[in-house]
Image: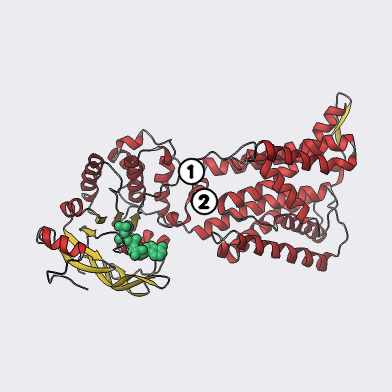
Amino acid sequence: MSNTLLSLDGVDTFYGEFQALFDLSIEVGVGECVALVGSNGAGKSTLLKVISGLMSPRSGTVSLRGENIGGVGAETVVKKGVTLVPEGRRLFPSLTVEENLLMGAQAKRGGPWSLERIYQLFPNIAERRRNLGGALSGGQQQMVAIGRALMTNPDLLLCDEISLGLAPVVVRELYERMATIRAQGMAVVIVEQDIGQASKVATKLYCLRSGRVVLEGSPSSLSRQQITEAYFGLETTAHGHS
Amino acid sequence: MAILEVIVQAMMLGGLYALFAAGLALVFGIMRIVNLAHGDFIVIAGFLALIVTWAIPVHPFVSLLIVIPVMAAIGYVLQRGLLNRIVGADPMAPLLVTFGLSILIQNALLQAFSGDTRKLQAGAIETSSMSIGGTAVGHYPILVFVVAVGVIWGLQTLFYKTRLGYVLRATSDDAQTVRLMGVDHRHIYAIASALAFAVIAVAGVLMAVRTNFDPTLGPARLLTAFEVVIIGGLGSFWGALIGGMVLGLAQAIGARIDPGIQMLVGHVVFLLVLLVRPNGLMPKVGH
Ligand SMILES: Nc1ncnc2c1ncn2[C@@H]1O[C@H](COP(=O)(O)OP(=O)(O)OP(=O)(O)O)[C@@H](O)[C@H]1O
Ligand SMILES: [Mg+2]
């Protein structure tokens, strides 16, 4: 067995007649941290929806430890160890913070994460455990969303723009916590529009544009200029894939 | 004492109406579906109890041991097989489908049971009473009220104090996101429907012991349930009890004045509440 956890091979995905992903292939190793960057509408969220099972690929395969999980549905995928922190947090507004976290335990996977551990990781949501999700600040809501995902005890955590709309100091705090989370050996895919933040923590980077991977490599081996060009589609270098 | 008699009458009507409404409120609250066949399922529960008591000579209340699970199963299958296809679609679809279902049920019941009026025979409890200050207070009205309070309390507790409760509320909030937690929203919708149908079973049997019924009574029960939900508001299951009591009291007072205007007074009070508090007496608080 190689140490590949997840691999997508030749994935095409559609919204009705609109094709959002084209022949897309990526790989995530066990315990690896992968950054996925790209501008608005590049297909980042769509890709995470396909991996987490919220959407089915029309063709191509999504395999987790060699098993095809494409199209089996999100409620099954999470039980196999892949979970998504969705874009816009999506807390349940009529549930308390604690009930939101407990929803993650519905996946019924054993592992290191429990209510206690989440409250240790994010002490300022522990104080708000009896509040409704909607009564929290944006940063606290994001912490609950991450905590709720961790409660499913994933092997692979997908994070969709967790820094969106948050103050830089809060974003820094979230990314510091991400280091603690990763110390458990869990693989992470981080989607961000901001290249800087993502490439700091990631060991591998994919740049998406118009539903295609246009650049991949380790952030340290790619120059700032290469990434920027791929991001905005300035076709000057020949590093693109498609 | 006239006042006591009115109150006892209101307790029975109100309890019955709260039970009619609780299932409707539950289904609407979780799935945003208005089931126009709701009243017809109440009538089905009455007929089901009738069949059970024909087949085995048991008391109608004992028949609930069969009627409740059978109705819950019908609710689960109906949701899973039919209504899940139209949850979240445009609101017209559930209205059309359940309206069709309502007509279908009424005609099927007419075919199977004819248009004759029926009644469940519950024996002594129907007429037995105790004397309070010289006024005869029937046991049955008290029983209906106590059952209604118990059912509403049970639903409220289930929704706000148990694990199934927060899973149901989360699914109602965001059916896509619960899937990321390993919850199959189609199953949870069907569970909610089964719960509603269990309450319908109790309502149907208590109704069928209390009054004559026939296959055409469904729409009138639906109308009552609607009025109760709108009077009570969607903030809590207790709203159904309060709505039921308000409507029951209005009708009991109306009947006291003139038996011919019982229903009319009920409708007028409903309209008044709608005018003064359009979101009901216990509205849903915004987030
Ligand atoms: N529900 C939908 N129906 C139809 N088209 C959609 C839908 N969601 C996204 N799209 C389209 O698919 C493409 C990819 O969208 P996606 O949300 O994956 O982009 P993204 O990279 O996450 O963008 P952002 O950074 O703005 O979140 C876009 O062209 C978008 O318009
Ligand atoms: Mg996105």
Q: How is the image coloured?
A: secondary structure
Which kind of residue does numbered mark 2 sit on? Ser
Residue drawn at x 84%, y 37% as measured from the top left: B254
Tell me, for residue A94, which label it has, or none.
Answer: 1
- What x and y, as percent, mark residue A104? 39, 50
User: Residue B7: which quarter of the image?
Assistant: top right
* Mark 1: amino acid: Ser
Residue at 66 percent across and 40 percent down: it is B232
Label ID, residue A241: none
- Badge 1: how crowded within 10 Å, few (<14), some, or many (20+)? some
Q: Given the image, what chain letter belongs to the residue carrying mark 1?
A: A
- Report whether B172 appears left or right of A137: right
Question: In the rendered image, which quarter contains the N terminus of chain B?
Answer: top right
Q: Say if residue B146 shows up in the picture.
A: yes
Q: Which residue is drawn at 87% across and 57% down?
A: B117
Closest to the observer, B38 or B118: B38
Q: Position of residue B286 (x, y in %)?
A: 51, 40
Q: Is mark 2 within 8 Å of ligand 1?
A: no
**Is there a contact, CB below 8 Å, between mark 1 and mark 2?**
yes
Percent position of residue B218, x then y: 77, 56
Which residue is more in the foreground, A36 or B203? A36
Q: Do the dots labelled 1 and 2 sit on one chain?
A: no
Is B68 on the left-hand or right-hand side of B87? right
**Label 2, on which residue?**
B172
Q: What element carries label 1?
A: loop
Q: In which quarter of the image is ligand 2?
A: bottom left
Calculate the distance from the C-alpha at mark 1 to the C-alpha at mark 2: 9 Å
Q: Is mark 2 on a helix, strand or loop?
A: helix
Q: Residues within 10 Å of mark 2 (few under 14, many from 20)?
A: many
Is residue A5 visible in the rendered image? The answer is no
Q: Is residue B217 above or below residue B132?
A: below
